[in-house]
Image (cartoon, helix red, strand yellow):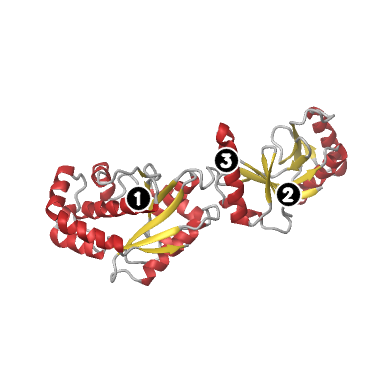
Amino acid sequence: MRKVLLIKYAEIGLKGKNRKEFEDILISNIRRSTGWDVSWRWGRIIANIDWEVEESSKIKRVFGVQNFSKAFVVDLDMEDIERAAVEISKLEVENGKRTFKVKAKRSQKKFEYGVYDINSIVGARILREFPELHVDVHNPEFTVNIEVKEKEAYVYSDKSRGPGGLPVGTGGKAILLLSGGIDSPVAGWYAMKRGVVVSALSFTSPPYTGKDTKKKLISLVERLKEFSGGRNIHLYLCPLTPVLEFLKDKAPSRYLLILQRRSMMRIAERLAKKIRVSAIYTGESIGQVASQTIENIAAIEETTTLPVIRPLAGLDKVEIVKKAEEIGSYEISIMPQVDVCSMFVPKNPVTKAKLSVVKEIEEELSEKLAKLEEESFAMIEKVIV
């Protein structure tokens, strides 16, 4: 009888012929994120750790994990199964639990005991060992789960929730437009939950923004890296001051915000093609601010040929803040900083931009604007987190 962490996945099980690839990437991500000895056995992932010594919560940040349990692995022997069930029950009794049930599953049909036999025999053994316990098949305080597999059995009670989703590395690659605010780190978290490998692009405006802004952005990426399956995240810092100052001086004030965002989107697309990623993620939520109305989003997105994905589109600020708090980015995001756009935001931005007007303005500025965007792109700094 030995202690292991029994790790289960859900969505991966629906992947048909590609399932093995998803499983392999998940196992690799767990190894990189935790340093554990991990293997696949009969539809389960086994981490060979002593959960009384090793901190098991590391697994809560690995996308693709549906739930995990502290378990015993035993031989296909009823006496061994009973002993493991008693040990599991002992832990629950020590935590004040007083009602239980036994739930067995058997995929190894050659095992001499059926499911109902296992439930009955193990339940009786637990009652003998712990007279204070009572059986409650409908609403037990804990369940002793027994899975009889081909060559061994797993015995466990608790199930801790993992983050779900798909393993990072199975969903392609994308750029995350990362500001220092609350929303964009949450968008990056949702991107990784769908298996996407993200690289972050942040726009700075020196000398208005300085080392504190850079430090904050790196801190946000460090927090996101905890969910990256052990992969490094590349942060690209693009100084946009010449573009912003030019637009503020030459463009109509009401359309300044739209034009700024279009410049950012063009630079993002250019970087995406250079580093060979296929999409752009943003932290936009419909209607939250002036630049995020449907009309303005359409006017901004028109400038890129890449898919622009907005996982927060249907969430309100309360929901976004709650998720930021859950993933640990909120306290970093609310640290004071000089935002790249707040220095140049107009007092009365247009909320329903007309694309024809936007393109007409850009046409007049195009030659100089394109040159400044190219200069900003050439000065991008890459930081590996």
Pointer 3 residue:
21
Q: For mark 2, what is the residue? A: 4
In the rendered structure, which disc, 1 or 3, sits on the residue that comes first in sequence? 3
Relative to 228, residue 382 above or below: below
Amino acid type at mark 1: Lys
Can you give x and y, in whole percent of width and height, for residue 323 in the image? Answer: 47, 50
Return the mark for residue 209. Answer: none
How far apart are the two marked residues, 1 and 3, measured between alpha carbons?
A: 26 Å
Q: Answer left or right for 1 relative to 178.
A: right
Total label count? 3
- Indicate left or right for 36 with 279 as reference: right
What residue is shown at x 24% (from left), y 45% (from top)? 296
Q: CA distance from mark 1 to mark 2?
A: 44 Å
Which residue is pictured at 36% across the width and 51% down the height?
A: 272
Relative depth, front residue between 104 and 318: 104
Amino acid at the residue labelled 2: Val
Q: Position of residue 125 (x, y in %)?
A: 86, 39
Q: Quadrant of residue 212?
A: bottom left
Neighbor class of circle 1 (other Cα within 10 Å; few <14, some 14-19, many 20+) is: few
N-terminal-most mark, 1 or 2: 2
Give neighbour class at mark 3: few <14, some 14-19, many 20+ (Cα, 10 Å): few
Q: Is label 2 or label 3 in front?
A: 3
Q: Secondary structure at mark 1?
A: helix
Decide if residue 328 is in sight here. Answer: no
Q: Position of residue 316 (x, y in %)?
A: 38, 46
Q: Is residue 315 visible?
A: yes
> On the image, which quarter does residue 158 sit in?
top right
Q: Which residue is mark 1?
A: 273
